[in-house]
Image: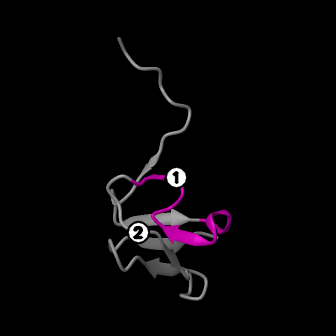
Amino acid sequence: MSRPSSAVTPILANAQNRYEVTHSDLPLSCPMPGMALWNSHPKVYLPIVDDGGESTCPYCGAHYVLRD
């Protein structure tokens, strides 16, 4: 029997190298709140605004770009 689909699809942590974020995602942390955390690293806050709209996580190397 199939499982009912979830209304919210989690963001997979460490699944890609580039993520686009908006001001509503601030303060920005990696992994982000909606990410599945079971296979990730400790949470680190990234100063994306102070970094000129782009930040890279020192743990996993994920690159975040501020869209607006």
Q: Is residue 68 above or below residue 40?
A: below
Residue 55 picture location, percent across and down: 47, 80
Residue 57 picture location, percent across and down: 40, 76
The residue positioned 35% from the left and 11% from the top of the image is: 1
Q: Secondary structure at mark 1?
A: loop
Q: Amino acid at mark 2?
A: Pro
Q: Nearer the viewer, mark 1 or mark 2?
A: 2
Tell me, for residue 42, which label it has, or none: 2
The residue positioned 59% from the left and 88% from the top of the image is: 50
In magenta segment, residue 27: yes
Furthest residue toward top: 1
Return the residue at label 1. 34
Question: Would residue 28 be found to the left or right of residue 43 on screen?
Answer: right
Residue 13 sits in quarter: bottom left
Q: Which residues are magenta?
A: 22-37
Residue 67 picture location, percent across and down: 58, 69
Q: Nearer the viewer, residue 29 or 54?
A: 29
